[in-house]
Amino acid sequence: MARKSNTDQRREEIVAALLATMAEHGYEKATIQLIAKRAGLAPGLLHYHFKTKAEILLALVKALAEQGNRRYAMLADAAVTPEQRLQAYIGARLGLGEGASAAAVAAWVVIGAEAVRQPDVRAVYQEVIHAEAVRIEGLLGDCLAALGKQQTQVRPLAASLIALMEGAFQLASAAPGAMPAGFAARTALDLVNRYMALEPAA
Amino acid sequence: MARKSNTDQRREEIVAALLATMAEHGYEKATIQLIAKRAGLAPGLLHYHFKTKAEILLALVKALAEQGNRRYAMLADAAVTPEQRLQAYIGARLGLGEGASAAAVAAWVVIGAEAVRQPDVRAVYQEVIHAEAVRIEGLLGDCLAALGKQQTQVRPLAASLIALMEGAFQLASAAPGAMPAGFAARTALDLVNRYMALEPAA
Amino acid sequence: MARKSNTDQRREEIVAALLATMAEHGYEKATIQLIAKRAGLAPGLLHYHFKTKAEILLALVKALAEQGNRRYAMLADAAVTPEQRLQAYIGARLGLGEGASAAAVAAWVVIGAEAVRQPDVRAVYQEVIHAEAVRIEGLLGDCLAALGKQQTQVRPLAASLIALMEGAFQLASAAPGAMPAGFAARTALDLVNRYMALEPAA
Amino acid sequence: MARKSNTDQRREEIVAALLATMAEHGYEKATIQLIAKRAGLAPGLLHYHFKTKAEILLALVKALAEQGNRRYAMLADAAVTPEQRLQAYIGARLGLGEGASAAAVAAWVVIGAEAVRQPDVRAVYQEVIHAEAVRIEGLLGDCLAALGKQQTQVRPLAASLIALMEGAFQLASAAPGAMPAGFAARTALDLVNRYMALEPAA
DNA sequence: AATGAATGAGCATTCATTCAT
DNA sequence: AATGAATGAATGCTCATTCAT
């Protein structure tokens, strides 16, 4: 081997550059030229490492999903009771404002809109949402069980929580100020907890 | 009198065509040619009635906002108690599934993503969100007052409800099936009602 | 109708420009820019009248085929005996050197090579060859009948004549000088006539 | 002795890979990457052994010409009478269908089209055609001499035979089925023999 | 000799916008 | 008001060629 491959690193750099560019310009206006400039690479190189621009987008969606997985794995270790795990989860997902993730949130909103029209993106987006739903249903089920409540509403409740979070990302990106800073996580948690508190016993 | 101007009607046709095209192709891929074909008009005519493509988009955002206003005005007349009004409101906004509005919902999601990058769109989007927030805060305030509860959490609660609705639109457009059909409105209402039920008295 | 369509004329101009450009540069090097310049049109206009560059090529193949049809129709009227018709046919097809058609001949050679790899081009090319074969078989059959000869070899003889003509085009374009000027038609006719003269009687 | 040079072998491998790739994709679409993959070599290596892609093409043209020479040399030994030599020659050249040579035939057709526009290719192509013409003229001259016929038509007859063969290659590659299988060689031989049979005596 | 990442010019194609009719 | 041809800048992508290793 006369030259060691740096493909994995380059791909990550390119994906990161798409994230940043997309957060600012949207997907269509995130041109290969612009992404390349942000990554400090020659435009042609992006097509050496990725066949098409759409492929970079898919890699980004997957990267963001994996990032979510890692965050979830970390918190799952730390928390003990079901309530703590739920709180930690919502806090991790909605704990916005830490600078670095603002771009990721904006990019995610753009991805959500691309999922409306691009079948490939939609497929991956749906996988991510579904995995999230499964996780939340597990967390809520544990909480309800610990409270001795019925679990018939787990699915719509989980779906509503996901909707609330996706909507919070949308508002944070397109209408900052609409959501009182930092209150999203707290209010979401209260909503869910009070809902469960008033569920009938099992 | 030569020939009466049909400008207003033409503008509405064009805006409607953008709505339909955008729901299917997104904003950038909703080309003037495509919009014109959908409207049954010549491409050049679109630039006679609108200076730029961006202007059509702004007209669409405003049209969707006004449509929301009209729906609200209608329901406000019918309902009597604060609880009825809140239920009617959420039902009207989240009562998806009536076919015709699926395109409007998808277009709204796309608009939300455009608001991330287009200042003009963002400004109008924020106006719409703000007006909605004011309305919901009024509704929630009335409900809490009728229940004799404190009203300190009206703002974050209203913001969360908006987030939930925007997120529900996103899921309906990009991940149909994630949200159990028709449950969005019911669960949202339950969440809010139980939250209020457990608020401290004023 | 506010503006009359000139599409047909423009398409012909574009096809003619491709013919000229291809004869000089081949298909791949006949860029849209080059073709447009030759036609005196803006590059973008070529894609207004044709969806793709490949579509222009197909239009050219069909145009050349029709041109051949017209030439054949003309001569069919003029000639009387089978021998005269055969002579006229070969003369018309191989009567090279009249300047204007040199480009067409070169373009046809390039088309033949494109037919090797482009299925769409190959399909049309085969249609043209087949139509030509049918015609020649008819001509040869008439001649053999008039001579009272058997007609069992009509097919391979026609195929050979087509091959000879296609090859003559190739030599005329890529190796002028190899074929003694103007002798192609005469030698081809002699070859066929002597072949038929020595066929067994029917 | 460090490591013996394998340059010659590598060059042959590369040329063979161009032949195969060109037969399938044409010259322009036979990219260095594609040729390298077919040869099982790294793309960069092709430019170590050849300065440019055009140089590989020239090497291929020469290789095909030499291959023809070798075939001719072989048959020349075996045959005795002029008629036998002519028959052997035509049979060797037109004896298509042996699988392995289909790609070579297709590549040759593509080369013929490149000769239309690339002066370097044209020069070599013409050399090959000229050498072929000289050979055929020799063969035909011998046949006519043996028959006691005049030899005034040797040149156009040889040119026509070359045209027929080049055209047969074209048809075999782009319109298989047009030429009744295996009949090309037989019919070509008959055409030439009957032509000679009816030549005036010397 | 060999590798494969890197470059950048060039390509077909798209598309908002203009404009003569 | 309306048409649809025309423009040209911009975009994603290709690819021969180079070069550090």
Image (cartoon, coloured by chain):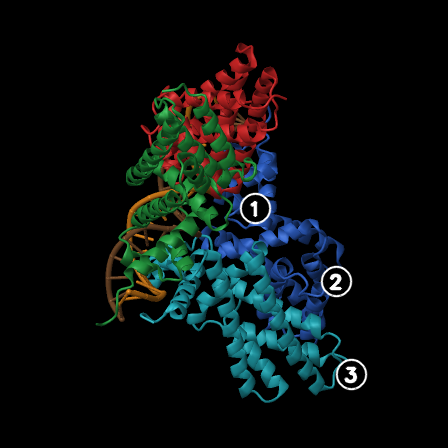
Chain colours: A cyan, B blue, C red, D green, E orange, F brown
User: Do tags 3 and 1 sit on the same chain?
Assistant: no
Where the N terminus of chain D falls, by quadrant?
A: bottom left
Q: Point out which mark residue A202 bears.
A: 3
Mark 1 and mark 2 residues within 8 Å of each other at the beta carbon:
no
According to the picture, the residue beneath numbered tag 2 turns out to be B84
Q: Is residue C3 above or below residue C55?
A: above
Image location (x, y in percent) of residue B44: 50, 32
Q: Is residue B190 left or right of residue B151?
A: right
Q: Tell me the SS state at disc 3.
A: loop
Q: Pinpoint the chain carrying mark 1.
A: B
According to the picture, the residue beneath numbered tag 1 turns out to be B60
- Compute the Cα span from label 3 to label 2: 30 Å
Amino acid type, callout 3: Ala
Q: Pinpoint the chain carrying mark 2.
A: B
Residue located 43% across and 47% down the image: D104
Q: Nearer the viewer, mark 3 or mark 2?
A: 3
Q: Nearer the viewer, residue A96 or C85?
A: C85
Q: Residue furthest bottom?
A: A80
